[in-house]
């Protein structure tokens, strides 16, 4: 299996090149990414599906994050990449979703890798079965939106670096 090629972009999300996934993160190159927040209506209001990253991930293993996050491949549009990754990571199909914003972040990890992403954030409604790929996700769970905001504030070390910004964009779009 060949390594996915990621889309390098400038700060305006204009493609400027391509790079393999690992070299991209080794060199800290700005690239296009996306994050998906799946929601459902619960007894106390909106609930968010969280995914704990598998321990074997190249960074942030074991941390909780939004429902799904990944990168479109070179030649792939976001509206193709989002459903592909929802199915690959979570076994979820047929989600109606919408984009709610973008942001740029950069974080260097202790293992020498750097995430530098222009992240497109999507929100979808889903209340069906989840069958997570254990090589991607070790655990999933629904959490009330207010509880999630409290946990992100009180225990940020339990979450990926991008999860607070993704959550803020997604929940603001739902109000």
Image: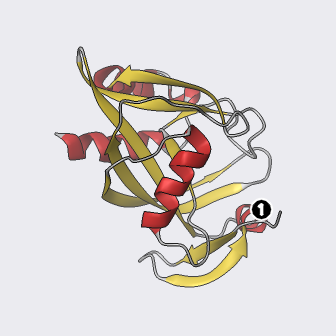
Give the image location of residue 20, x and y in percent. 74, 70
Looking at this view, is 153 or 63 the one in front?
A: 63
* Numbered-mark total: 1
Q: Where is the N terminus found, in terms of image quarters?
A: bottom right
Q: Is residue 38 visible?
A: yes
Q: Could you say which quadrant of the image residue 30 lies in?
A: bottom right
Task: State the residue lying farthest toward the top.
Answer: 43
Q: Which quarter of the figure has residue 74?
A: bottom right
Q: In the rendered view, does 118 fall on the left or right side of 2?
A: left
Applied colour scheme: secondary structure
- In the image, residue 56 sits, relative to residue 82, either above or below, namely above
Is the C terminus in the top left, top right, bottom left or bottom right quadrant?
top left
For residue 56, side relative to residue 34 (left or right):
right
Of residues 106 and 23, the one drawn nearer to the viewer in this rendering: 23
As drawn, the residue found furthest toward the right would be: 1
What kind of element bears circle 1?
Answer: helix
Residue 105 seen in the figure: no
The vertical placement of 97 against 125, above or below, is below
What percent of the width, then of the height, locates residue 81? 52, 62
Residue at image point 56% right, 66% down:
72
In this rendering, is residue 121 above or below 28? above
150 to the left or right of 109: left
Q: Residues within 10 Å of mark 1 (few under 14, many from 20)?
A: some
Which residue is more in the foreground, 112 or 8? 8
- Is 134 drawn above or below residue 69 in the view shown? above
Residue under numbered circle 1: 22
Q: Position of residue 122 (x, y in %)?
A: 37, 52
Image coordinates for residue 172, horizontal then vertical, percent = 23, 43
Residue located 62% across and 31% down the image: 63
Identified at 72% across, 64% down, the residue is 21
Farthest residue in the bottom direction? 16
Residue at point 55%, 42% (across, down): 161
């Amino acid at each position: 299996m060949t390594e996915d090629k990621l889309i390098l972009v400038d700060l305006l999300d204009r493609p400027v090149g391509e790079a393999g996934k690992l070299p991209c993160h080794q060199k800290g190159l700005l690239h296009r990414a996306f994050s998906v927040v799946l929601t459902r209506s619960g007894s106390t209001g909106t609930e968010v599906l969280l995914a704990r990253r598998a321990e074997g991930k190249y960074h942030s293993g074991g941390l909780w994050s939004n429902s799904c996050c990944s990168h479109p491949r070179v030649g792939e549009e976001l509206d193709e990449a989002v459903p592909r990754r929802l199915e690959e990571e979570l076994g979820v199909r047929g989600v109606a979703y919408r984009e709610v914003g973008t942001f740029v972040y950069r974080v260097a990890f202790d293992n020498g890798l750097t995430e530098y992403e222009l992240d497109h954030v999507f929100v979808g409604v889903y209340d069906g079965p989840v069958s997570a790929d254990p090589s991607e996700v070790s655990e999933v769970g629904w959490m009330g939106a207010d509880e999630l905001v409290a946990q992100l504030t009180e225990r940020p070390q339990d979450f990926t670096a991008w999860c607070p910004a993704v959550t803020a964009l997604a929940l603001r779009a739902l109000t």
